Image (tube, rainbow, N blue to C red):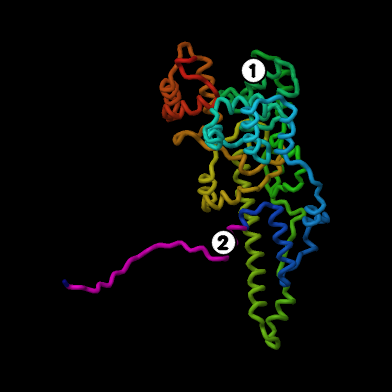
């Protein structure tokens, strides 16, 4: 037996995250309030950082004082749970209702699928039972519009709870959920054949006044501070600016830096590190704010029709599309979208809520649009159409959808299959 020693070279790729890179990533994820608090803490700890009081907007904003003096108010979830106590519910309904409430976003909308809630509850209850509780219990709670799964639904719930005339509610339903209307102008022109001009205009005005984030309006959520503000101009375009008000502007204390670097003084290694940390923080915060503005500006440009009240439907838009357009990583976009808000003419909305995934690879169509298309086909069918037939009809129009996709979204709108219709 012969033993040989062989030298072998292998080339491996390994991604190592440096401490500075990790800190930069962490900064991207912070909400406006969190980053303001971080800046204030860094100023207290690093003598080389100073506030630029001349440039800082006057407002007397003190986050630490705000948090300490904040009254102990009920959260949206607690407020909804209290209301459940006044309703006669059986154990099943109450259990499902509590899980749905805990699944709501800060804005009051339910942005996870019902089958995810079904899985969360270990399949103890069906999606039909969950949907029944959502529609008949949660969406009937205060504030109006809570528990909706998208902006259209929250608008319709709010109109329904205002007890507007039956005809106006009928018009609203057609404007919001008829897939052939791509804008309010299209809907207005088509519906004018069947309804009076005044009724249609009245409904459109009420739609535009609805709150897109009912959960934010309930809580005393001055803790939720938008990073960006949308300012419409005379041409119905949008200018998106970073909100400088109450945002601490910081700079390097150059006088102190000169003293430390003076050759007559013995430079302390720790002080040098503090100078480096101060410079890094200033650069990183500027980069963070610039990236937030770039992402927000692109989102608002793509969703301009929705934000300017020309339609009630979001255009399909994903993290990957934003990343490709801005030439940054999709993971960077995901971190930017976390806990970031935009002040729009429709109120404060989370940046993430202005995105909508597409269910088709060949045509941009949101899940909401697909469900409306399916609903429209089923309502107009002369003979019962199977999921495959519905798929074929839509694919002739370029949707390129599989039968199982049709089945999935048909179930989401609680439509039985062709045999049971």
Image quarter where the N terminus lies is: bottom left
The residue lying toward the viewer, choosing from 92 and 112, is 92
Q: CA distance from mark 2 to mark 1?
A: 55 Å
Farthest residue toward the left? 1
Magenta part, dominant SS: loop
Magenta segment, which residues?
Answer: 2-26
**Is residue 232 shown to the viewer in this render?**
no
Q: Quadrant of residue 46?
A: bottom right
Q: Is residue 336 above or below residue 400?
A: below
Farthest residue toward the bottom? 264
- Residue 82 at x, y = what percent? 74, 34
The residue lying toward the viewer, choosing from 194 and 274, is 274
Crowd band around label 2 with a 10 angstrom C-alpha radius: few (<14), some (14–19), many (20+): few
* Residue 421: numbered disc: none
Crowd band around label 1 with a 10 angstrom C-alpha radius: few (<14), some (14–19), many (20+): some
**Is residue 265 shown to the viewer in this render?**
yes
The residue lying toward the viewer, choosing from 302 and 237, is 302
Q: Quadrant of residue 34?
A: bottom right
Residue on which disc 1 sits: 191
Farthest residue toward the top? 382
Residue on which disc 2 sits: 22
Q: Viewed as shown, does residue 418 lie left or right of 137?
A: left
């Amino acid at each position: 037996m012969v033993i040989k020693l062989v030298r072998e070279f292998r080339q491996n790729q390994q991604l190592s995250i440096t401490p500075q890179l990790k800190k930069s990533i962490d900064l991207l994820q912070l909400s406006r309030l969190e980053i303001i608090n971080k800046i204030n803490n860094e100023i207290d700890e690093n003598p080389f950082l100073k506030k630029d009081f001349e440039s800082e907007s006057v407002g007397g904003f003190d986050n630490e004082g705000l948090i300490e003096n904040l009254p102990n108010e009920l959260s949206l979830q607690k407020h909804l749970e209290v209301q459940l106590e006044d309703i006669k519910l059986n154990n099943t309904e109450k259990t499902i209702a509590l899980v749905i409430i805990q699944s709501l976003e800060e804005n009051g909308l339910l942005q996870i699928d019902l089958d995810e809630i079904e899985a969360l509850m270990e399949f103890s209850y069906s999606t039909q039972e969950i949907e029944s509780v959502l529609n008949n219990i949660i969406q009937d709670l205060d504030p109006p519009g809570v528990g909706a799964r998208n902006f259209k639904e929250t608008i319709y719930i709010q109109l329904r709870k205002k007890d507007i005339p039956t005809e106006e509610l009928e018009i609203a339903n057609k404007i919001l959920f008829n897939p052939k209307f791509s804008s309010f102008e299209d809907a207005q022109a088509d519906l004018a054949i069947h309804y009076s001009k005044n009724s249609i205009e009245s409904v459109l005005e009420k739609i535009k006044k609805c709150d897109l984030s009912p959960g934010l309006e309930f809580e005393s959520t001055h803790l939720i501070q938008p990073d960006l503000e949308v300012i419409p101009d005379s041409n119905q375009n949008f200018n998106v600016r970073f909100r400088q008000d109450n945002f601490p502007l910081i700079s390097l204390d150059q006088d102190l830096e000169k003293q430390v670097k003076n050759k007559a003084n013995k430079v302390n290694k720790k002080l040098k590190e503090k100078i480096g940390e101060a410079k890094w923080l200033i650069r990183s915060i500027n980069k963070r704010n610039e990236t937030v503005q770039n992402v927000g500006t692109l989102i608002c440009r793509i969703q301009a029709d929705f934000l300017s009240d020309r339609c009630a439907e979001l255009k399909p838009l994903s993290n990957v599309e934003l990343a490709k357009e801005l030439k940054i990583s999709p993971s960077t976009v995901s971190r930017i979208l976390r806990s970031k808000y935009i002040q729009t003419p429709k109120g404060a909305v989370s940046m993430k809520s202005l995105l909508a995934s597409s269910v088709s690879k060949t045509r941009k169509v949101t899940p909401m649009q697909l469900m409306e298309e399916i609903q429209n086909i089923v309502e107009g069918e002369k003979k019962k159409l199977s999921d495959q037939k519905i798929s074929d009809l839509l694919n002739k129009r370029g949707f390129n959808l599989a039968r199982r996709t049709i089945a999935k979204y048909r179930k989401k709108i609680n439509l039985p299959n062709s045999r049971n219709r």
